[in-house]
Image (cartoon, helix red, strand yellow):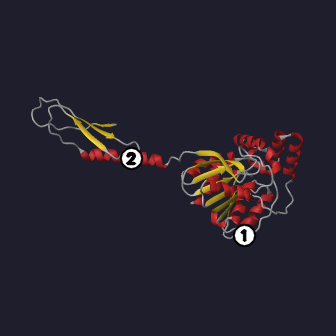
Amino acid sequence: MIRLERTVHHEGSKKHEDHEEHFVQILSTKSLRVLRYSSCLRDRPSLEVRFSELRLTLVVWFGAITVAAAGRPEATASGIADVNGTHLYYQTMGRGRPVVLVHGGLVDSRQWDDQMGPLARQFRAVRYDLRGYGRSAAPTGPFSPIEDLRALVDFLKIERATIVGLSLGGMAAADFALEYPDRTDRLVLVGTGLRGDTQPPDEKSLNAYRVGGREGADRYFDAFLQADLLAGVRNRPAARERMRLMMTDNFKALAYLAPGTLLSDIRAPTLVMIGSLDSPILWHIADTIASKVPGARKVTIEGASHHPPVETPQEFNRALLKFLR
């Protein structure tokens, strides 16, 4: 209930010290359906009620509520999707055109912590853990990440979406766009690999895998810090700690990675993003994709290496939202 105090004009003798209280009661918490106006008077003098002031107060009040609600993302939903013979952890936030985020092969969906909120203000943001990563089930045999993604968007009743993939996730996103072009609105590839790429692998990354195989996850991360893929987190303690947690948690998933082949041209509007400090191998792949995908745009994220969403989230979000608008 809102109390509105107004000036009252009384007729007759000044001996009356009557006063007035006006109340507006909102009978519905969700919308202004009924207003009840009542006056509490003694001796019932005639009144001049300033209805214009009352209307102005209500307009301002409801305008403030509308603005606040418009800037607040819709509540988050998360769960386990039983799809394609596995269990995939997912999270959704916001409403609007769907944007599905696919994480890289060293981490899990926590990679997108700084993107979900900004995206949810305009879009329906979706992130999930790939099979074998994070809170999703481990593989029990051969599987297709493309069909996992297709089954998840079916589960969430998404007909068409923008797919944003980083590294391994970019490979899955590109393959999804090729396999399901009618269900791909736009495509964003961030530091992505390329199936069938024949460049020699990065020696420092290979050494980190070898160290991990011999000495475990913690030493694997320490060795990986020497590679170009993590150059952007060396001098960013918070980002480095996030990467350490995700990479050691998901070290087991490295055994599930398998090669494949990229088949044909991508037709969806495509943005290729690459960190300025990322591996030369991935820079070559970014240039190749940008030159061969019709109409593709390429954006460099300055000061970032292989995980711009974690290392430089504001710059990454700015480029992503500009492309999606």
Instruction: Classify residue 300 by image quadrant.
Output: bottom right
- Asked whether 34 or 166 is in front, the reply is 34
Q: Can you say whether 306 is above or below 222 in the image?
A: below
Q: Whole-percent x and y of residue 181?
A: 66, 66
Q: Amino acid at mark 1?
A: Asp
Quarter of the image for residue 267 reads: bottom right
**Three-letter amino acid code at the position of disc 2:** Ser
Q: Is residue 177 visible?
A: yes
Q: CA distance from mark 2 to mark 1?
A: 50 Å
Residue beneath disc 2: 31
Locate the C terminus and report the quarter of the image it occupies: bottom right
User: In the picture, which quadrant includes the N terminus?
Assistant: top left
228 with respect to 161 (left or right): right
Q: Nearer the viewer, residue 73 or 205?
A: 73
Q: Residues within 10 Å of mark 1 (few under 14, many from 20)?
A: few
For image coordinates 17% across by 40% down, the residue present is 47
Residue 41 in percent (x, y) is at 19, 33
**Residue 251 sits in which quadrant?**
top right
Nearer to me, 184 or 278: 184
Q: Which residue is mark 1?
A: 265
Mark 2 secondary-structure assignment? loop
Circle 2 crowding by C-alpha within 10 Å: few under 14, some 14–19, many from 20: few
For the question of whether residue 276 can be seen, the reply is no
- Which secondary structure, mark 1? loop
- On residue 319, the disc is none
Q: Is residue 319 left or right of residue 246?
A: left
At x 81% / y 48%, what residue is drawn? 254
